Image: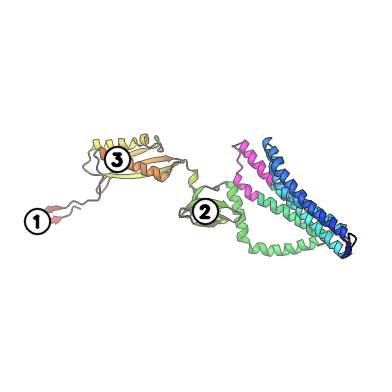
Amino acid sequence: MLDTVYYGNSLKDWVISLSLIIASLIVCKALSLLNRRLVRRIASRRNYPYEGICLKAVERPVLLGVILFAVWLALHHLKMESGMHDLISHSCSLLSILDATWFIARLTTSFTEESIVLSRYRDENRRFDTNLLPLIKRGLNILVWIVGIVMALNNAGVKVSTLLGTLGIGGIALALAAQDTVKNILGGVTIFIDRTFRIGDIINVGGVEGTVEDIGIRSTRIRSYDQRIIIFPNYKLTDASITNISREHARRVVATLGLTYDTDHHRMQHALTLLKRIPETIHDVHKKDLSATFSGFGDSALIITCTYFIRKPANILETISAVNFEILRSFNEAGLNFAFPTQTVFIENGKEQAPK
């Protein structure tokens, strides 16, 4: 029965080829379980970060390589026509090169990422910005895949030199049509290098204030306070004036108060004293940077200007509210009256005359 011929091969040969493919799938499953449950744990326990990240990154390309090798053995075990045999050989070779490219790309990007993160962890004073990682990883991936695809095409019989010449001519036209894209890419690189802002920073640009959610190659995404995503082309951000709110050490707040004109100088001085005591009750307010001055005479009030700074990362709005409540409470207890717009009218000889 095993000697029965089907499509030019005995049943025994078909069974052997199929068994090779099934065996490769079983081996891949065993290797995957061994890597996840034993090898990675040993690497993590012995504090081998590079080994752990590399094993995790290259697992899939290695397993795919095992399957491709088994398929190649299975197909070569069978008798085929010369044309079909050549087609299968070229296909297996092409897929092997692409798998090797995948292996190198994952290994390179993973090793680079782990090296940068570890170096920054060991030395906090290093100026390298980890937010540059996505750009570096994408660049390495593109470079490795370009080399791998060129090698695969060359192995498949495609004249790479002719193809590159055609792409060069087309590339000139494409570059002219993609000037904005190039400017955006260079703008993204500039943002990363200058470290104008990072992911998670709160910035204000062009009157738009929000949190930076992503810095891509072409654009930057900012989530505004009303939870809307606003997308800025990178080249516009490099030319704009940007206020990085997250980089401020403290938030400056200027409060203007008005007391009634019947407030004498002793009570006015007491009001200034009460304002200077605010840091004693509101701990998020800097004490040495607080100033309270009698700043002028208004139309209907004696003006007091109080300037204070709120420490980061305190909640700005809640702290301002707490300060205002403290001012209201202390001034009410001291009998200090807040002024409101008023107008005095004098009556002379039975006629109303407003003062000039």
Whether pointer 1 and pointer 3 mark residues with C-beta atoms closer than 8 Å, the reply is no
Percent x, y of residue 69: 81, 53
Location of residue 328 by image quarter:
top left
Q: In the rendered image, which quarter is residue 290 located in?
A: top left
Q: Nearer the viewer, residue 343 or 122?
A: 122
Q: Which residue sits furthest front?
A: 1
Please say whether residue 100 is visible from this viewpoint: no
Along the line of sight, which residue is nearer the eye, 288 or 19? 19
* Amino acid type, residue under disc 2 in the picture: Ile
Read off the magenta span.
110-136
Q: Estimate the spatial distance between the alpha carbons at disc 3 and disc 2, rounded to whole Å.
A: 39 Å
* Residue 278 x, y percent position in the rendering: 35, 37
Q: Say whether marks 1 and 2 touch (CB < 8 Å).
A: no
Q: Secondary structure at mark 1?
A: loop
Residue that numbered label 2 is attached to: 222
Tally of marks: 3
Residues at marks 1 and 2, CA–CA distance in whole angstroms: 66 Å
Location of residue 97 in the rendering, given as x and y in whole percent from the top left corner: 78, 54
Residue at 30% x, 37% y is 272
Q: Give the label, 1 or 2, closer to the camera.
A: 2
Q: Say what amino acid the circle numbered 3 marks.
A: Arg
Secondary element at image label 3: helix
Give the labeled residue for mark 3: 329
**Which residue in the protein does label 1 denote?**
350
On screen, residue 222 versus residue 150, left or right, reads: left
For marks 3 and 2, give the one nearer the viewer: 3
Seen from this angle, which residue lies furthest left?
A: 349
Judge whether 39 appears above or below 216 on screen.
Answer: above
Determine the residue positioned at 62% across, 61% down. 179
**Amino acid type of the residue that numbered disc 1 sits on in the rendered structure:** Gly
